[in-house]
Image (spheres, rainbow, N blue to C red):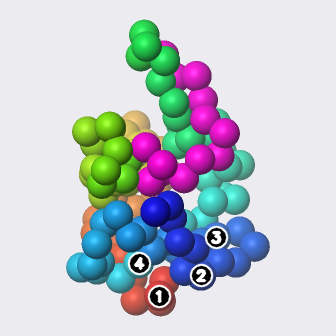
Amino acid sequence: MGAKVYYSLVDSLVLNHQEIGDHQRPLVRFIHEEHAAILDCNRCHHVYDQYGVNVGGEEQACSECHGANKANPIHLLRAFHVQCKKYHSALLAKGRESGPVMCGQCHVRKAE
């Protein structure tokens, strides 16, 4: 199963990934349009060749590779946290403006 769009707006969406199972925290609203304006798509929509080179993906959902029954050893929940928090933390360490890095900053009740 891929990502099920639980709620969407023109520039943001809230994903409900079945692969994660029962969500322990409120769902996260991801503002895709905002991220797409400042990041290369390959940062998130990545596919690696046999040499470990990111050759980019074609707008595939994260769960296509990071689902529970996929060959990729990185679980979907970990992939989200590593991708988002690591990038935001790196920006903060450089003294740059960044997105949230703490659980409650992403997982807020209004996203549901």
> Where is residue 57 drawn, in percent x and y?
61, 35
Does label 3 or label 1 sit earlier along the sequence?
3
Residue placed under numbered mark 3 in the picture: 12
Residue 23 at x, y percent in the picture: 29, 78
Q: Amino acid at mark 1?
A: Glu
Residue 9 is situated, as x and y percent measured from the top left of the image, at: 70, 78
Which of disc 1 and disc 4 is earlier in sequence? 4
Disc 2: which residue:
7
Establish if 1 lies above or below 59: below
The numbered mark at residue 27 is 4
Q: CA distance from mark 3 to mark 1?
A: 13 Å
Does residue 111 appear in this view?
yes
Q: Amino acid at mark 3?
A: Ser
Residue at 41% across, 78% down: 27
Asked whether the residues under the numbered discs 4 and 3 touch, taking CB atoms below 8 Å apart as contact, a structural biologist would say no
Q: Earlier in the sequence, mark 4 or mark 2?
A: 2
Q: Nearer the viewer, residue 34 or 6?
A: 6
Q: Residue at x 59, y 81 (%)?
A: 7
Magenta part of the protein: which range? 53-65
Q: Secondary structure at mark 1?
A: loop
Figure quadrant of residue 50 = top left
Q: Disc 1 designates what residue? A: 112
The three-letter amino acid code for the residue at tag 4 is: Leu
Measured along the vertical axis of the image, is residue 2 above or below residue 90? Answer: below
Q: Residue furthest top?
A: 51
Question: Label 4, label 3: how many angstroms apart (C-alpha)?
Answer: 13 Å
Tell me if 58 is positioned left or right of 101 in this view: right
